[in-house]
Image: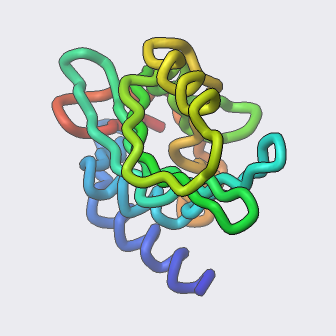
């Protein structure tokens, strides 16, 4: 499976790499970013006795607004009870050189919609989540640059930009 993931990343990279006068530029479409995101999903976390699973991430890039939006399905499970929702968050793209990741910084929750809910007495938790709409969330991981370094060793992004509906990485 890991070989398949590496091969998928290599194919995506080869299809988007362009050189410009000693600089290297990688342009990723929304679909390519979504394909790369699938490698890291689903994400599972535990919070106050509730198991959370984030899946099916979808990115939307609005370069003219310098914003990126990520939508994900969230399943909260407690014992045999589940709540399934969809949420969207929007923020700006940033490169974190220490962790070597491209991330969405200062994301804010745009929407939170419950798809189905079998968790008893969930009103307070649902109300708290809905009140978080418009509030700032923690940083959201987008892409692991270490994956790119497998194929382009030693290169670190110098600039990350959103152009139209693409993510452009300059090395």
Give residue 165's quadrant in the image: top left
**Image position, residue 66 (x, y; %):** 31, 18
Q: Tell me if residue 24 can be seen.
A: no
Q: Tell me if residue 58 can be seen.
A: yes
**Image position, residue 64 (x, y; %):** 19, 18
Q: Is residue 67 left or right of residue 124?
A: left
Of residues 83 and 88, the one nearer the viewer is: 83
Colouring chosen for the image of the structure: rainbow
Give residue 91's quadrant in the image: top left
At 52% across and 76% down in the image, what residue appears?
A: 5
**Image position, residue 92 (x, y; %):** 43, 21
Instruction: Give above or below for 164 relative to 75.
Output: above
Of residues 30 and 112, the one nearer the viewer is: 112
- In the displayed image of the protein, which residue is found farthest to the right? 49
Instruction: Give above or below for 171 relative to 55.
Output: above
Give residue 10's quadrant in the image: bottom left
Of residues 141 and 83, the one nearer the viewer is: 83
**Image position, residue 67 (x, y; %):** 33, 22
Of residues 147 and 109, the one nearer the viewer is: 109
Q: How many labels sit on residues?
A: 0
Quadrant of the snapshot with the N terminus = bottom right
- In the displayed image of the protein, which residue is found farthest to the front? 121
Instruction: Give above or below for 158 relative to 169.
Output: above
At 76% across and 32% down in the image, what residue appears?
A: 98
At 43% across and 29% down in the image, what residue appears?
A: 89
At 33% across and 38% down in the image, what residue appears?
A: 167
Q: Is residue 84 left or right of residue 22?
A: right
């Amino acid at each position: 499976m890991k070989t398949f993931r590496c091969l998928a990343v290599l194919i995506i990279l080869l299809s988007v790499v362009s050189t410009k006068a000693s600089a290297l530029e990688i342009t990723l479409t929304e679909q390519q970013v979504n394909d790369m995101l699938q490698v890291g999903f689903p994400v599972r976390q535990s919070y106050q006795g509730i198991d959370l699973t984030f899946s099916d991430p979808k990115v939307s890039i609005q370069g003219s607004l310098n914003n990126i939006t990520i939508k994900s399905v969230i399943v909260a499970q407690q014992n045999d009870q589940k709540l399934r929702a969809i949420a969207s968050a929007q923020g700006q793209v940033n490169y974190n050189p220490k962790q070597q990741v491209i991330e969405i910084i200062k994301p804010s929750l745009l929407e939170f919609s419950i798809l189905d809910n079998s968790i008893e007495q969930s009103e307070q938790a649902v109300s708290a989540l809905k009140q978080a709409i418009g509030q700032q969330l923690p940083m959201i991981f987008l892409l692991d640059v270490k994956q790119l370094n497998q194929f382009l060793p030693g290169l670190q992004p110098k600039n990350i930009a959103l152009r139209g509906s693409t993510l452009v990485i300059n090395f």
